[in-house]
Every structure is written in C-alpha cells, then in structure tokens.
C-alpha cells in the first residue's frame, strides 16, 4: 500500500474561502473588518516566519491585522500592558501572542491576561475548560485543524481508536479533548502516549488514527504502525541540508518514507497540518468578531 496524501494546503484553502465570505458579511453589517493583533517578542526566526504568514493570511481573507513587536529583553509588565491595551481596543477582535516567549516572561501569566473572548488561540484556562466540557467558544488552532483534516479527508474519527503521541498544552492534550467529545467529527476512543509511556509501539500499533506531536523526528517508524493507519504528522523540525538555499529542510515527527508504504493516508510536512493552523486562526478571529457583534 502507498498512502494517500492528506493535502493540508488544499483543505486550508477551502476553510479560508469560507472565512473570507464570513469576513465580507461582517464588513457589510458593521463597516469594520475582523481584526487580529499579533504580538511577537524577541527575534526567533521560526516565530517571525509564523507571524508573517498569519498576517498575510489575514489580509488575503479580508481581515485586518495589527502587528506588535517587543524586543527579546521585554519585561513581564511590558508584555502584559500591551495585552491590556489590546483587550480594550474595539478594533482588535483576536489577540495572538506568539509562543515561545523569552524566559524572563512567564508565559502562563501572559495567557491569563488575554481576555477569553479575544483568545483566538484558545490557550486561556477559561477556554481550555470550556473545550474540556464540550462547550467551546474557540478551539485551539492546530488541534481544530487536525479535526478538520480528518473529517474533510473522509477519515471521520467517530468510533476509531486515536492514539496521540505528545501531551503538550498546544497540541497533544487539546486534540485528545476535542476528539474524545460526544460530538460530530469526534466520538473517538483516545489514548495519549508521552515520554513516560513504556513501550509506546504497543500503543501506536493499535491506532486507527495516529496523531504525532512529539517534537522529535522519527518518533514513529514503520514497525510501530498497523497497515491502513491514518497518520497526522504535527512535527516541524529543521534539519540541516546544504543542498537547500535556506540551509535546512523541514521534516515531521514521523519517518514518512518508511510509514507511507503501510499507512492508508498521511499528512506531508510541509503542507499538512501547518496550513490548517493558520486557517483555523482566521476562522477563530472571524468568530471572535461575530461574538463581539461590532
Ligand atoms: N507557537 C507554536 N504554535 C503556536 C500557536 O498555535 N499559537 C501561538 N500563539 N504560538 C505558537
């Protein structure tokens, strides 16, 4: 078997087209565009590139974006006072503080400072709690994108055994919380594996759907999956590659070449989960504007 590719770029384009329609309707009703404020602290190359892509996508969907940059020496107070200003700004419907933050800044305190109704990342504990009880206003972007990839590629998780590798607050825990709900596009049996798991392969081999978000290349190899598995590879790892102009290439957390002979379907890296994260951020921002009503 050679796996079908789950084309995140194509699926994201459909979501973005829908968001553009919603943004136009919002503009027609209010005379305003949905607005996203991005906050970038420091000069991490990956973060700069993500924020640039997010802002470009906003413009393409007919939404406003407001970019704020603070130096890598920024203090807790400086970051929190910017967030407070954005909380109060009626033209800002969504606030995104790009993570990770420099180590002198307490990430959890910053996330707590964002008002939950503008928290388009859905990282605030209020939104995390609402997600867990099955009543989300916003779902975190990468996990929501994973759910859309599964459903829209014809791999509905309903009744399936989903094994998640990784327990981060950004991906592993929330994707498990989404897919375990008694809801459309969910209703799965979910297992979470992590660095404390003994014999991870014993679990991954039971997966109908495998979501790999471990942050480490080759976490999952061909011997660790059953034939016909559907694999979502969340990893984005830069590997040095002198043949590339940039000096690096991107690989996921899964040994793509090995598993593609056994899997029924798999997301590529790049072009799988990444484009969906941005599409869901736009969707959340349009929804935040709609909830704000003006
Ligand atoms: N860093 C890595 N992923 C994300 C994300 O989805 N949102 C934010 N704000 N920072 C991130």
Image: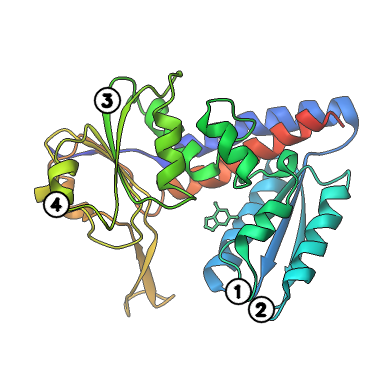
Assign a secondary structure to mark 4: loop
For disc 4, the neighbor class at 10 Å (few under 14, some 14 to 19, many from 20) is few
Q: Earlier in the sequence, mark 2 or mark 3?
A: 2
Assign a secondary structure to mark 2: loop
Q: Earlier in the sequence, mark 3 or mark 4?
A: 3
Q: Which residue is mark 2?
A: 72
Which quadrant holds the C terminus? top right
Residue at 43%, 19% (x, y): give it.
Answer: 182
For disc 2, the neighbor class at 10 Å (few under 14, some 14 to 19, many from 20) is some
Assign a secondary structure to mark 3: loop
Q: Which residue is mark 4?
A: 199
Tag nearer the camera, 4 or 1? 4
Q: Quadrant of residue 79?
A: bottom right
When the figure is inspected, residue 240 is found, relative to residue 193, above or below; the finding is: below
Distance in Å between CA atoms under marks 3 and 4: 21 Å
Residue 161 in the figure: left or right of residue 228: right
Q: Quadrant of ligand 1?
A: bottom right
Front residue (pair 197, 142): 197
For disc 3, the neighbor class at 10 Å (few under 14, some 14 to 19, many from 20) is some
Which color scheme does this rendered protein use?
rainbow
Distance in Å between CA atoms under marks 3 and 1: 39 Å
Distance in Å between CA atoms under marks 2 and 3: 44 Å
When the figure is inspected, residue 48 is found, relative to residue 17, above or below; the finding is: below
Q: Earlier in the sequence, mark 4 or mark 1?
A: 1
For disc 1, the neighbor class at 10 Å (few under 14, some 14 to 19, many from 20) is some
Q: Earlier in the sequence, mark 3 or mark 1?
A: 1
Distance in Å between CA atoms under marks 2 and 1: 6 Å
Determine whether label 3 and label 4 are within 8 Å by CB: no
Residue 256 in the figure: left or right of residue 175: left
Residue 160: which numbered mark, if any?
Answer: 3
Determine whether label 2 and label 1 are within 8 Å by CB: yes
């Amino acid at each position: 078997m050679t796996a079908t590719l789950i084309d995140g770029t194509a699926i994201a384009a459909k979501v973005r087209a829908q968001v553009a329609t919603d943004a136009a309707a919002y503009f027609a009703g209010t005379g305003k565009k949905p607005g996203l404020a991005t906050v970038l602290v420091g000069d991490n190359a990956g973060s700069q590139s993500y924020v640039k892509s997010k802002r470009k996508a906003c413009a393409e969907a007919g939404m406003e974006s407001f970019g704020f940059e603070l130096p890598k020496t920024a203090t807790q107070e400086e970051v929190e006072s910017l967030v407070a200003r954005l909380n109060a700004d009626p033209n800002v419907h969504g606030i995104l503080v790009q993570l990770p933050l420099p180590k002198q800044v307490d990430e959890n305190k910053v996330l707590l400072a964002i008002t939950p109704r503008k928290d388009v990342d859905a990282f605030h504990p209020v939104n995390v709690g609402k997600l867990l009880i099955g009543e989300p206003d916003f779902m975190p972007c990468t996990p929501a994108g994973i759910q859309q990839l599964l459903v829209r590629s014809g791999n509905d998780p309903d009744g399936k055994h989903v094994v998640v590798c990784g327990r981060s607050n950004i991906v592993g825990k929330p994707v498990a919380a989404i897919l375990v709900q008694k809801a459309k596009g969910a209703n799965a049996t979910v297992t979470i594996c992590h660095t404390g798991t003994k014999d991870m392969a014993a679990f991954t081999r039971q997966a109908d759907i495998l979501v790999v978000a471990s942050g480490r290349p080759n976490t999952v190899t061909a011997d660790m999956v059953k034939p016909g598995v559907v694999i979502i590879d969340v990893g984005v790892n830069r590997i040095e590659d002198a043949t590339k102009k940039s000096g690096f290439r991107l690989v996921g957390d899964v040994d793509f070449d090995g598993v593609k002979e056994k899997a029924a379907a798999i997301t590529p890296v790049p072009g799988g989960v990444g484009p969906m994260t941005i599409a869901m951020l736009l969707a959340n921002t349009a929804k935040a504007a709609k909830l704000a009503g003006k």
